[in-house]
Image (spheres, rainbow, N blue to C red):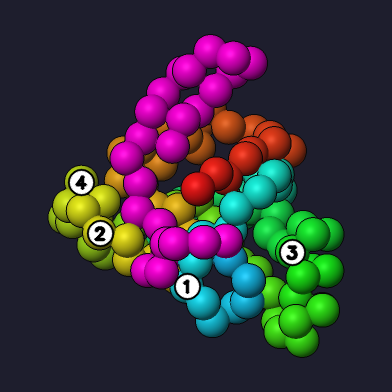
C-alpha cells in the first residue's frame, strides 16, 4: 500500500488483504477486498482491531452491481492493525491474507497511518 501526498510517496506498507484476494469484492461473504475509488469516511479507535479507518465501501458502482446480482454488497471495510490482544503477531500478519475484506497493517504502521491520514481522504484500491 502506498501512502501518497499528491504524486509523492510518503510511505509504503506491506499489507494483508481479504482471504480471497483475487478479484473485486462483490458481496458480503466473498472475503475479498474491494477495488475502486473510496474515501476514508470515519475513524474507529475502539474497534476489535487496533485502530481502524473506515473505507466508504460500497460505492455507487458496488451497490449497482450488487442490486443487479441480487446480493448484499456488505460493508464494514477498514484499514486496521491486528486484532486486539494479538500485537505479538507484529509483521508476521502480512505473510498471508487473513482479513474478511479489510486491509491490515502492523499496529505500529497503523499508528503512523492514523496520524497521517485525515477523514475525507480519497483512496484508490487497485488489484
Q: Is residue 66 magenta?
A: no
Q: Nearer the viewer, mark 2 or mark 4?
A: 2
Residue located farthest toward the top when viewing the structure as drawn: 8
What whole-number distance in Å separates the C-alpha atoms at marks 4 and 3?
A: 31 Å
What whole-number distance in Å separates the C-alpha atoms at marks 4 and 1?
A: 21 Å
Tell me if I can see residue 87 in this picture.
Answer: no
Judging by the rendered image, the residue that carries numbered circle 1 is 31
Q: How many numbered marks appear?
A: 4
**Which segment did they paint magenta?**
1-24
Judging by the rendered image, the residue that carries numbered circle 4 is 91
Q: Is residue 5 left or right of residue 21?
A: right
For the point 69% across and 74% down, which residue is it? 73
Q: Quadrant of the N terminus?
A: top left
Judging by the rendered image, the residue that carries numbered circle 3 is 62
The residue closer to the viewer here, 32 or 15, is: 32
User: Of the residues under marks 4 and 1, which one precedes in the sequence?
Assistant: 1
For the point 46% across and 30% down, which residue is it? 2
For the point 32% across and 61% down, which residue is it? 97
User: Of the residues under marks 2 and 1, which one precedes in the sequence?
Assistant: 1
Q: Quadrant of residue 112?
A: top left
User: Of the residues under marks 4 and 3, which one precedes in the sequence?
Assistant: 3
Please, what secondary structure does the residue beneath circle 4 have? helix
Q: Is residue 98 left or right of residue 117?
A: left
Residue 22 at x, y = what percent? 44, 62
Q: Is residue 9 magenta?
A: yes
Q: Residues within 10 Å of mark 1 (few under 14, many from 20)?
A: many
What whole-number distance in Å separates the C-alpha atoms at marks 2 and 3?
A: 26 Å
The residue closer to the viewer here, 62 or 89, is: 62
For the point 54% across and 56% down, which residue is it? 78
Mark 2 and mark 3 residues within 8 Å of each other at the beta carbon: no
Amino acid at each position: 500500500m502506498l501512502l501518497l501526498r499528491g504524486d509523492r510517496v510518503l510511505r509504503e506498507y506491506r499489507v494483508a488483504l481479504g482471504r480471497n484476494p483475487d478479484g473485486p469484492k462483490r458481496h458480503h461473504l466473498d472475503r475479498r477486498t474491494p477495488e475502486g475509488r473510496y474515501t476514508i469516511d470515519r475513524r474507529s479507535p475502539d474497534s476489535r482491531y487496533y485502530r481502524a479507518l473506515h473505507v466508504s465501501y460500497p460505492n455507487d458502482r458496488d451497490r449497482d452491481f450488487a442490486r443487479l446480482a441480487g446480493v448484499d454488497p456488505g460493508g464494514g471495510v477498514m484499514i486496521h492493525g491486528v486484532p486486539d490482544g494479538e500485537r505479538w503477531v507484529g509483521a508476521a500478519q502480512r505473510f498471508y491474507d487473513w482479513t474478511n475484506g479489510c486491509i491490515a497493517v502492523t499496529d505500529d504502521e497503523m499508528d503512523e497511518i492514523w496520524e497521517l491520514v485525515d477523514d475525507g481522504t480519497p483512496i484508490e484500491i487497485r488489484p
